[in-house]
Structure formats: C-alpha cells, structure tokens
Image (cartoon, rainbow, N blue to C red):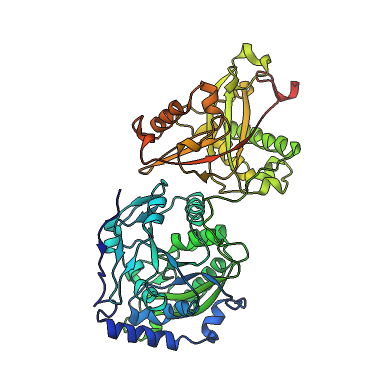
Amino acid sequence: MVLEGVRRAMYAGSWYEADPDRLSRQLAEFLANAQMPVDSKSAALAGGSNPPVQHPVLAIVVPHAGYAFSGQAAAYAYKSVAGQKVRRVFLLGPSHHVGFHGGALPMQVVFQTPLGDLEVDKEAVEQLRGYPLFAKMPEVHRVEHSLEMQLPFIRQVFGAVKIVPVVVGALSDETDIRLMAEILKGYVSAGDLVVVSSDFTHYGPRYDYEPFRTDVKENIRKLDSRAFQLLSRKDLEAFLKFHDETRDTICGLYPCSVLAAMLPDQCHGTLLKYYTSADTGVEDKSNSVSYMAIAFSGGNWPEHPASAFKVSETIHLSPADREALLAMARKTIETYVRTKKVPTAEELGVRISEAMRSRLGAFVTLNKFAPGAAGSGQGGRNGHGELRGCIGYIWPLKPLYQAVIDNAVSACSRDYRFYSVQPDELKYIRLEISVLTPPRRIGGYQDIVLGRDGIVLFKDGHQSVFLPFVATMFGWDLPETLTQLSKKAGLAPDDWKDGAKFDVFQADVFEEHRLPGRSPATQ
C-alpha cells in the first residue's frame, strides 16, 4: 500500500499558536526558561536518585497538553537534546479517540506544522507495516493530538528531520509490549531520537479517577513519583504491576512501557521537570493532570539499524541445560494437565543456568505415540508418532526458561488445532524443544535455505511461521513450502510471490530420551 497525503495540523489555533512567528517566539521563550539544575520540587519526585543527563540522549518523555499548561515542561525535555545532531525522530504516543490493538501507522507522507512540514520516513513505515502488531490507520493519526503536540517542538529544535509516527493502542500483555519494542529496536540507530508523548496522573471527576479524597496533592505526587522511579529504571514488569494495582491514569502507559523495553540496559532516566495543571493557575482545582519531562541517556543506539531481534547470533546450551529445559517442560505439562495450575520456576525445582536466562525464542512440540509404537524411540517428525501440539515464541521476548514454561502450557492446552491434552495421554507424549536464533530480515524468498532456515512470512498484517524441519518432513520444495506458508497465514496460495516479507532463523532442537508409553519411574 502506497503512502499518500498530508496530515494537517488539527489543533493549531486552539491548543497552540497557529501563527508561525508567535509560535516560534513562544517555543523560544519556553526553551530559554528551561534552565538546569532541576528545581527542588522536581528533584524530590525522583526519590533521591536522579543522575545527570549524558550525551547522547536516546529518548525523551514529553507531556502533550495545550502549551499553556504543559509547554514549559515539554521544553525541558527538548532542551536536554538541543545541540545534539538528530537525523530522525521515532514518535510514539497514545490514542485518545480511537480504540484499537497494536500500533497505528500513517498513510500520510507529510505532517504539517505552522513552522514547516515534517516528512515521514516512508521506508521505515513500510517496513514496520509488515509486522502483525502494526497496521495502517490514517484516521487514528488525523484526530490524535498526542503526536501533533510534539511536532512544533521537533521542527523548532531539530529542523526538517524525518519522523516515524506511531500511535500506540492497547497491548495485550508484557509479551505484546516486548514484541513491539523488539520490532522498533530493529530500525533505531545512532542519530535517532525516540520521543514518547505522555501525561501522567489524571485525577478528578472529569477522569473518573479519585482513589483518595484527602491529601490529594501529596497523594498524586506519590503516584507520579513511583511511576517515574520504575520507568527511569526501565523496570517494565514492576511498572505494569504498579499500574494494575493503582489503575493510575497514565495516558501514555503503553508507549512508555514500549520505551522501557526498547532502551539499552545501561540507559537511565533523568527527571528534568515536574508539575501539575493545578500549578498553572487554572481555576478548576477538582481535576489535575501531571506533567513530566524525562530524558533517557547512557549508552547508545547501534551505529547501523540492527536486524529486528538481533539479541544473539548463536545458541550456547550445554547438554545439562537441554536436559533441565526438557525436565521443566515435562513437569509443567504434567502439573498443568492434572491441576490446571501453571507452576512457577521455583516449584519446578530445576536449576536455572545463565544460558537459560538468556532471551531467546522457543517452541515446545508434543508428539504422541500409539501404545504399540512406544519402543521405536523415533520422534514425531520422523514418522513415528503424530503431532499433538506445537506453540512457541518466534521472538526473544522472555528468558528462555520462562518461554519454555509458557509454551509448554500453551502446547498442551491452547493449540487451536487440538483438544487439550488429557491426563491419560501424558505417558504417550514425547516432548521436543526448539530454541531459536533471533529472526533476521532477508532480501527475498530466494535467500531461504530449506532444512536450515525457519521461515516467518509477513504480508498485509498476516503472519505465519514454519520451523526449519517442516519442509523436509513433508518433502516440499521452496515454492510448495511458501505456498503452504501463505495458506497458513490466511492468504491466497500465491500471495508469497509479490509483496511478502520474510524473516529467517535457525533452531537448536532437542527431545526427551524417555520412551512414550512408559511412566518416567520405569524408564
């Protein structure tokens, strides 16, 4: 689908000045007033840990209310990057008007501001559109203010840089968040800046959020302080748990979460400015919105765009690691099938090595043997036994041991092709685990090597995957493999021939040595 059109400045003249000269002077004044060091009120919110900004700044979190309210806070964020050479901005913000899942990409090629146009990086947008979490949604962009409020600042401070605008809708869980982050990380490189547009606590009857009625200002400050501290440490799990417990009305919850999962390990957050709408002189004191400017620095984006999910090129599992992972999968399945409870890693009683803590994709496959075939010792894809479930993570979203636990449960109970495994079947099932290298994008299907490569097909929001052994198991050549992959994705059989994109990966595959049909105690 070809990008086309112009995204007009919908809120110029209402939320901020439409006249270029007045707007430029206003922004210049905001930036001039953004002086460091951080004032005592803002510093107190950081909880005593607020390291100085280093350069380069990799990302900023910026509020998006009308400039009369949050413009000064926004200026602190942009001031922290002033003088830094920025060639492109990845712009992430929440949706306030349209509900959807995933990331909304624009069809428009230009985003207007009163200070001059900003061109969309069409190639990056087209690449992102190949992934199922992203889709073209021009109407979402047309009405959304969270991104628009950043555009005049971007134009004023960095000039006519290219932008990659993404409105982030709801994401199902931590896995979805990490997946979006890993996809975006595949395209960010040195010279890029990530701008996340978010306000923080929205308190009062207007926002249907009044968890406390006394010491309101102090309690809002405590909520914002906790949110900042978790976000600045990039502690995604704790940040999401905090939200679940408090239901804090952070409008940019999902884009902030994606940022936490994107940033390099050594990166840290610095609070630059904090205040609430009540501090701006508004008459309505019953409602409050919190504004924070945060800079993330320390570390670097890669010099060149990395292939998405390029966490590790090789897999280093010892024989003991493989046996431990198989034992975890077996105990998980037996526990879940019999009790419908997912055991924790601690309950499984298996030693977790450093290699098992690496983030890697993994599939768990169940092959069922007929009672009379138990002694053959052959896996299901070798003709002895039949597939009974196979589910996994293609991408390195979780530590390997956790991916195995998750997918062991899914393989025995959530593979839509099969009914759930029953207790009396357990002794006839042999487990197989495939640990995957991170997928890498290839130029075209001609680069696929059957038998070596697992294949992920992407087209028009559709996706399907084959593990490396699938083609050889069925005796398919490359055209037949891709035809079957297209059909699996819900596409027409020949859709792989035009406009499809492909990722490939390799797999370390290992299986149980136990003989199905006999209980572990008699092996």
Q: Residue furthest top?
A: 372
Is residue 285 in view from this perspective?
A: no
Q: Quadrant of the C terminus?
A: top right
Q: Is residue 469 left or right of residue 352?
A: left
Is residue 213 in view from this perspective?
A: yes
Classify 360 as above or below 219.
Answer: above
Q: Nearer the viewer, residue 342 or 447?
A: 447
Residue 8: image location, x then y, percent: 25, 67
Classify 493 as above or below 360.
Answer: above
In the image, what residue occupies the spot 48% across and 54% down?
A: 177
In the image, what residue occupies the spot 41% across and 31% down?
A: 488
Q: Nearer the viewer, residue 89 or 322?
A: 89
In the image, what residue occupies the spot 42% across and 47% down?
A: 131
Residue 383: image location, x then y, percent: 58, 17
Classify 279 as above or below 479.
Answer: below
Q: Is residue 392 left or right of residue 212?
A: right
Residue 253: image location, x then y, percent: 45, 62
Which quarter of the figure has residue 49? Answer: bottom right
Residue 60: image location, x then y, percent: 48, 71
In the image, what residue occupies the spot 49% across and 34% down?
A: 414
Which quarter of the figure has residue 75? Answer: bottom left
Classify 283 as above or below 342.
Answer: below
Which quarter of the figure has residue 519? Answer: top right
User: Total label count?
Assistant: 0
